[in-house]
Amino acid sequence: MQEGRQILVVDDDGEVRRLLEDYLGGHGYQVHTCADSTGMRQALQAGLPDLVLLDVGLPGEDGLSLARFLREHHDLPVIMISGAGSALDRIIGLEVGADDYLGKPFDPRELLARVKTVLRRYQRPGAREVDAEGGESIRLGRYRLELQRRQLYDEQGHEVELTAMEFDLLQAFAQRPNRPLSRDQLLNLTQNRDWNPYDRSIDIRIARLRRKLEDDPEKPQIIRTLRGVGYMLVVGPSH
């Protein structure tokens, strides 16, 4: 269902911008391009795209800084593109909020496949329902998360007790299922602050959630660990 989906390409290389505009445009996407941070912010003010392709090595404010800005201000999928394709660069890109990372030079067919995959993650929310009182709930496998009441129920209708922090964390996951989320993103979404390497609060809360939700907390199937990236709530056939 790419028809009409809008992609914003932010890259200072005019040849790359033309390549992506032609190739992705030929596959049914509406592609807008700009060369730097100023152009990106102007484009966002005009209207939010469905996905951002963001070059790391931009002049002035670089792509890592812009990825952090996007994560803090907009819930948009971001794929980072960089000529520096080392594992460390990829990890840094994902930690600051990117959903995927691709090194240059790249095969346009691979980029297209990654675009489709990332967009699918944003199209697969947990099944949303409305309870008898009109409150919204999200189905998470055999659990039901009631957003208005801030409560979680199992398949027998028994409440699973959650602390306020645990609920906020589970809600952040439930609203972004099948999508990798870094510790930095999770802290920003739940406490409006950034993560540092000595902060274990997210890991501790996820461990507690796993003890409440998982059949085997040592082999989690609902909240998965993505090594070097963060965590992901798995919803759907793969769970």
Image: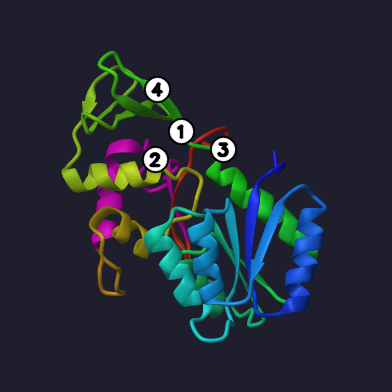
Give x and y (percent) for residue 178: 51, 45
Element marked by disc 3: loop
Mark 2 highlights which residue? 174
Residue type at numbered disc 3: Ser
Report the magenta residues as a range.
201-226
Q: Say few, some or many: other residues with alpha carbon within 10 Å of mark 3 (under 14 / 14 to 19 / 20 or more).
A: few
Query: What residue is shown with label 4?
Result: 129
Q: Do the residues labelled 3 and 2 touch (CB within 8 Å)?
A: no
- Is residue 43 located in the magenta-colored stretch of the structure? no
Q: In which quarter of the image is the N terminus?
A: top right
**Of helix, strand and loop, which one carries label 1?**
loop
Q: Is disc 2 surrounded by few (<14), some (14 to 19) or many (20+) residues within 10 Å? A: many
**Image height check: is 168 above or below 102?**
above
Q: Would you say the residues marked 1 and 2 are in contact, meaning their CB atoms lie under 8 Å apart?
A: yes
Measuring 71% from the left and 76% from the top, which residue is drawn there? Answer: 104
SS at badge 2: helix
Q: Is residue 21 above or below residue 171?
A: below
Please give the residue where the numbered disc 1 appears in the rendered image.
126
Closer to the camera, 35 or 57? 35
Task: Give the alpha-carbon distance from disc 3 to disc 2, as whole Å.
Answer: 15 Å
Residue position for label 3: 238
Q: Which residue is drawn at 67% across and 54% down?
A: 115
Question: What's the CA distance linking mark 3 and mark 4?
Answer: 21 Å
